[in-house]
Image (cartoon, rainbow, N blue to C red):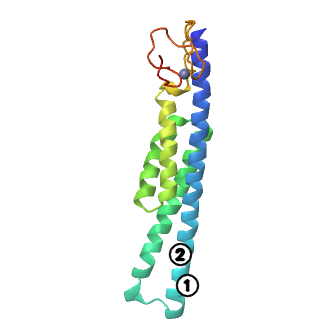
């Protein structure tokens, strides 16, 4: 009976962690996608403002395009990879999603995709909880029933609750006892 209860609470915990991992990975993906769109717009804008009016200044070729170009390439890569990782999570392939979500998160932080990076790392921690097979945190277990105070026949003159015969102070309200 105890093992059934443990299995049921493990299953509920597992599902909650999977749901969190899915949500975090989805939010991370959305931010990476946003980065990809911004990177793409920056790249196209740079191309049009630099190259169209001036007409291919060769000595100037890489300088204005290289940063938006790198940013666009990296953010598109992160968006695609986080989408693939999200599909693994959706399909319950937590093991396959775990390492990529950590790498994606670190890359995100490294390449200034901060919010996406943070969410991917959060997804990683949830996936790690699932794949490690760790028991649910103790906080989820119901607290043991509080010990009932023994009836003593003596009550606190201040709060009226039962107190031990030899008490010098009330253990409920702290009132000093005669
Ligand atoms: Zn009292």
Task: Depth check: give the residue in front, 127 or 55.
Answer: 127
Q: Nearer the viewer, residue 167 or 60?
A: 167
Q: Give x and y (percent) for residue 8.
A: 62, 20
**Residue 143, placed above or below residue 106:** above
CA distance separating discs 2 and 1: 10 Å
Please state which of the two labelled residues, at mark 2 or mark 1, is closer to the viewer.
Answer: 2
Quick check: 157 above or below 85? Answer: above
- Where is mark 1, residue-wise? 48
The quarter of the rendered structure image containing the N terminus is top right
Residue depicted at 45% across the width and 9% down the height: 166
Q: Which image quadrant is residue 57 in?
A: bottom left
Quadrant position of residue 4: top right
* Whole-percent x, y for residue 141 in the image: 55, 22
Marks 2 and 1, the one that precedes in the sequence: 2
Q: Residue at x 44, y 62 (%)?
A: 112
**Element at badge 1?**
helix
Q: Answer few, some or many: residues within 10 Å of disc 2's Cα (few below 14, many 20 plus, some between 14 and 19).
A: some
Residue 170 position in % (x across, y down) = 50, 20
- Residue at the bottom extreme of this rendering: 54
Q: At numbered mark 2, what does the secondary structure look like: helix, strand or loop?
A: helix
For image coordinates 47% across by 47% down, the residue present is 121
Q: Is residue 136 visible?
A: no
- Residue placed under numbered mark 2 in the picture: 42
Label 1, residues with CA under 10 Å away: few <14, some 14-19, many ≥20: few
């Amino acid at each position: 009976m105890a093992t059934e209860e443990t299995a049921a609470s493990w299953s509920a915990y597992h599902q909650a962690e999977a749901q969190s991992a899915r949500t975090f990975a989805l939010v991370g993906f959305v931010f990476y996608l946003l980065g990809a769109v911004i990177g793409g717009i920056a790249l196209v804008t740079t191309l049009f403002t630099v190259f169209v009016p001036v007409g291919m200044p060769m000595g100037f070729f890489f300088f204005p395009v290289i940063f938006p170009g790198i940013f666009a390439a990296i953010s598109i890569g992160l968006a695609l990879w986080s989408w693939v990782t999200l599909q693994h999570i959706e399909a319950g392939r937590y093991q396959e999603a775990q390492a990529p979500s950590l790498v994606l998160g670190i890359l995100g932080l490294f390449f200034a995709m901060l919010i996406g990076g943070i969410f991917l790392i959060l997804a990683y921690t949830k996936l790690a909880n699932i794949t490690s097979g760790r028991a649910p945190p103790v906080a989820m277990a119901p607290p043991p029933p509080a010990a009932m105070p023994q009836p003593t026949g003596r009550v606190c003159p201040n709060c009226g609750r039962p107190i031990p015969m030899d008490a010098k102070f009330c253990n409920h309200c702290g009132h000093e006892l005669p």
